[in-house]
Amino acid sequence: MGPFDIFDTIDRQRRAGRPFCVATVVRTADVTSAKAGAKAVVTETGEILGHLGGACVKRAVLSAGQEAIGSGETRLIRVKPSEKVVSLTDADGTQVFKSGCPSGGTVDVLIEPYELPPLLVIFGDTPISRALAAHAALAGYRLALPEGAVGPPEAARFAGTDISALPLDPRDFIVVASQGTQDLACLRAALESPAARVSMIASRRKADALTAKLAAAGIGADRIAGLKSPAGLDIRALDPQEIALSVLAEIVLWRNTDRTTKGDAHENHA
């Protein structure tokens, strides 16, 4: 095993496609095993990769790191001896964690969540799907495409309609652009996934016919009701490039709306 490199670790976490945060010791006072400049990665599964100091600091960083991954907000925390803690928020607004470690030092840690770009899964290998993949790559989205479909080389691939291995979560997006090739199977896979936003390149009549079959097969009414078809904003799009642009514009709108809603909810909770 080679020497530990925090920046290689950060790069591997980015490539893994899961959220994480970076914890950096920015200040220490009195005696402490933590050193200013020390960094570690906190994963969404509760693992700390790197050295930040003793167990008290690690517990605080793990707790704050998990909260930061959930909220997406950078924060500064302070770990200080229990006997010196008057309030769980210091006068400068820093969140305080009590430490029972015998060293008796104080440690300030900056917690920076790394939020991966949303994953956009595109079913189909059609002129519209290709244009959408190209537009989305330029906009910085992570992509997942069917094996053999034309698209950016860095896109993840899946076989047929099986997207179970993709790291999907509710903030990701799926567009069914199969346009006549395995439409029902593609739509079923999309609606059974964790992605909250699913749209389809199809007429409303075609989408209704397909979802009626899926409802009879047991797909939940709430998932079917969330399907957006025809996909895209109404910009009077005509050719595949324009249609793809309208679909991506709708995805950007959804993404920014969700961000605003999440931010408002966090402020209200605070």
Image (cartoon, helix red, strand yellow):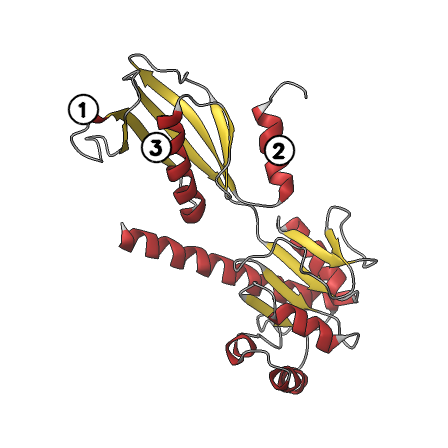
- Rate crowding at label 3 as few (under 14), some (14 to 19) or many (20 or more) other CA atoms within 10 Å: some
Secondary structure beneath disc 2? helix
Q: Residue 222 bears which disc, if any?
A: none
Residue 266 is left or right of residue 203, and the answer is left
Residue 57 placement (x, y as % from top left): 37, 27
Q: Residue 83 bears which disc, if any?
A: 1
Return the disc, 1 or 3, that comes first in the chain's sequence: 3
Q: Which three-letter amino acid code belongs to the residue tagged 1?
A: Glu
Q: Which three-letter amino acid code belongs to the residue tagged 3?
A: Leu
Q: Badges 2 and 1: C-beta atoms under 8 Å apart? A: no
Q: Badges 2 and 3: C-beta atoms under 8 Å apart? A: no
- Disc 2: which residue: 11
Q: Residue at x 60, y 65 (%)?
A: 193
Q: Residue at x 48, y 40 (%)?
A: 46
Q: Which of marks 1 and 3 is in front?
A: 1
Q: Badges 1 and 3: C-beta atoms under 8 Å apart? A: no
Q: Residue at x 62, y 66 (%)?
A: 247
- Rate crowding at label 2 as few (under 14), some (14 to 19) or many (20 or more) other CA atoms within 10 Å: few
Q: Which of marks 2 and 1 is in front?
A: 1
Return the disc, 2 or 3, that comes first in the chain's sequence: 2
Secondary structure beneath disc 3? strand
**For the residues marked 1 and 3, what is the alpha-carbon distance in whole angstroms?**
21 Å
Q: Which three-letter amino acid code belongs to the residue tagged 2?
A: Asp
Dividing the picture into quarters, in which one does residue 189 lie?
bottom right
Furthest residue to the top?
A: 31
Dividing the picture into quarters, in which one does residue 145 lie?
bottom right
Return the disc, 2 or 1, that comes first in the chain's sequence: 2
Q: Residue 76 bears which disc, if any?
A: 3
